[in-house]
Image (cartoon, rainbow, N blue to C red):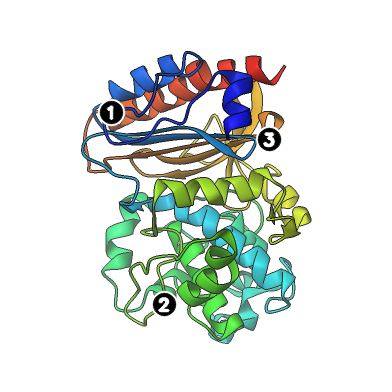
């Protein structure tokens, strides 16, 4: 860290609304702009594996977990990759009827063609349980059964139809395939190797951990997860998540109505940021883990996520912050 600071003239910025040490000139504008966003609760920047900017706002603290909302889907993707690497799941081509044999008796025979990859890429073809369909789904007595009973609105494997229900099916599959809860598998296979303990998060009426929403992580834990992907799945010199899985995860598989300017991979959004290829985990209200591989850069934000008319403006401000005030000075320092 001291070597990095000497090279860039950077210091680690931490604390709540304040800063310890001198304000870094390279990222000063980013820190100042972040402080002006009333919904923002944290901004962390990791470059080449070192935390070069860490700020908290609105009373947030480094030790305070954040509900990362749908950024959970990127974590679920990593868990699926780990389960496949360890042989608990055969491959992304495995049909989900292997785990839900009742689906083979559904009147819609085409549901039998849905695969693990279709769930990862939101291309199951099942009617979405996100957006307007979310409330009825989470109020149902059996979330898995409810998702499987949705009508097909597209051929499996064709069209991206963003649905948290698809990610929840992945959690149910992980529970069956690993013979452990999704939380236990995540704790043992992902969190502990990354050096932290993962908090428990909500479960459905059958006790299956919510797949694709409501996970809680501190911003520093989010940074560690992003660094894992930026480092091709390696941590402390050893492979944790196969690089081949990460490479497949960020191949664009299509666009959805939730993000017409970005594509979707295996639980990750993909787009260009500041003229650089990037992929990111995105949670409702402004929970982000941005990974910009060409710069060895990871950026994390957490935000107040309550419903508000200003939420969309806040998301735009975060994109602007990363594109205009974080990427340019890091790119300049990397030359």
Residue where numbered disc 3 is placed: 293
Mark 3 vs mark 2: which is more N-terminal? 2
Q: Which x, y percent locates residue 311?
A: 29, 32
- 188 to 311, vertically: above or below: below
Q: Which x, y percent locates residue 255?
A: 58, 39
Q: Quadrant of residue 65?
A: bottom left
Describe residue 54's horizontal placement relative to residue 60 as left or right: right
Q: Which x, y percent locates residue 152?
A: 52, 62
- 167 to 2, vertically: above or below: below
Secondary structure of residue under mark 1: loop
Q: Nearer the viewer, mark 1 or mark 2?
A: 1
| Residue density around tag 3, few if under 14, some if 14–19, many if 20 or more, within 10 Å | some
Secondary structure of residue under mark 2: loop
Between residue 131 and residue 103, name the one nearer to us. Answer: 131
- Residue at the (54%, 75%) spot, across then down: 185
Contact between marks 1 and 3 (CB within 8 A): the answer is no
What quarter of the picture does the C terminus occupy? top right
Q: CA distance from mark 3 to mark 2?
A: 34 Å
Residue where numbered disc 2 is placed: 208
- 57 to 34, vertically: above or below: below
Q: Residue 18 has which mark?
A: 1
Q: CA distance from mark 1 to mark 3?
A: 30 Å
Residue 124 seen = no
């Amino acid at each position: 860290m001291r070597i990095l600071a000497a090279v860039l003239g950077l210091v680690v910025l931490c604390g709540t609304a304040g800063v310890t040490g001198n304000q870094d000139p390279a990222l000063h504008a980013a820190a100042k702009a972040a402080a002006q966003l009333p919904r923002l609760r944290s901004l962390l920047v990791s470059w080449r594996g070192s935390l070069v900017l860490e700020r908290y706002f609105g009373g947030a603290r480094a030790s305070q977990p954040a509900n990362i909302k749908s950024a959970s889907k990127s974590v679920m993707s990593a868990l699926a990759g780990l389960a496949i690497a360890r042989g608990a799941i055969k491959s992304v081509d495995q049909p989900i009827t292997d785990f839900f044999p009742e689906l083979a008796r559904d009147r819609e025979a085409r549901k039998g063609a849905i695969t693990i990859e279709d769930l990862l890429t939101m291309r199951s073809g099942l009617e979405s349980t996100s957006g307007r369909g979310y409330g009825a789904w989470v109020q149902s007595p059996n979330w898995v059964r409810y998702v499987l009973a949705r009508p097909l609105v597209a051929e499996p494997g064709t069209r991206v139809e963003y649905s948290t229900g698809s990610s929840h099916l992945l959690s149910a599959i992980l529970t069956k395939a690993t013979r452990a809860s999704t939380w236990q598998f995540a704790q043992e296979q992902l969190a502990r190797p990354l050096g932290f303990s993962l908090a428990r998060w909500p479960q459905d009426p059958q006790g299956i951990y919510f797949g694709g929403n409501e996970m809680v992580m501190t911003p520093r834990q989010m940074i560690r997860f992003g660094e894992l992907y930026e480092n091709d799945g390696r941590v402390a010199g050893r492979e944790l998540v196969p690089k081949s899985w990460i490479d497949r995860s960020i191949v664009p598989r299509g666009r959805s109505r939730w993000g017409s300017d970005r594509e979707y991979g295996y639980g990750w959004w993909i787009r260009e940021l500041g003229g650089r290829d990037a992929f990111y985990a995105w949670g409702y209200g402004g929970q982000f883990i941005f990974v910009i591989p060409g710069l060895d850069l990871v950026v994390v934000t957490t935000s107040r996520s309550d419903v508000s008319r200003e939420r969309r403006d806040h998301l735009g401000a975060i994109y602007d912050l990363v594109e205009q005030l974080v990427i340019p000075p890091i790119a300049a320092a990397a030359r």
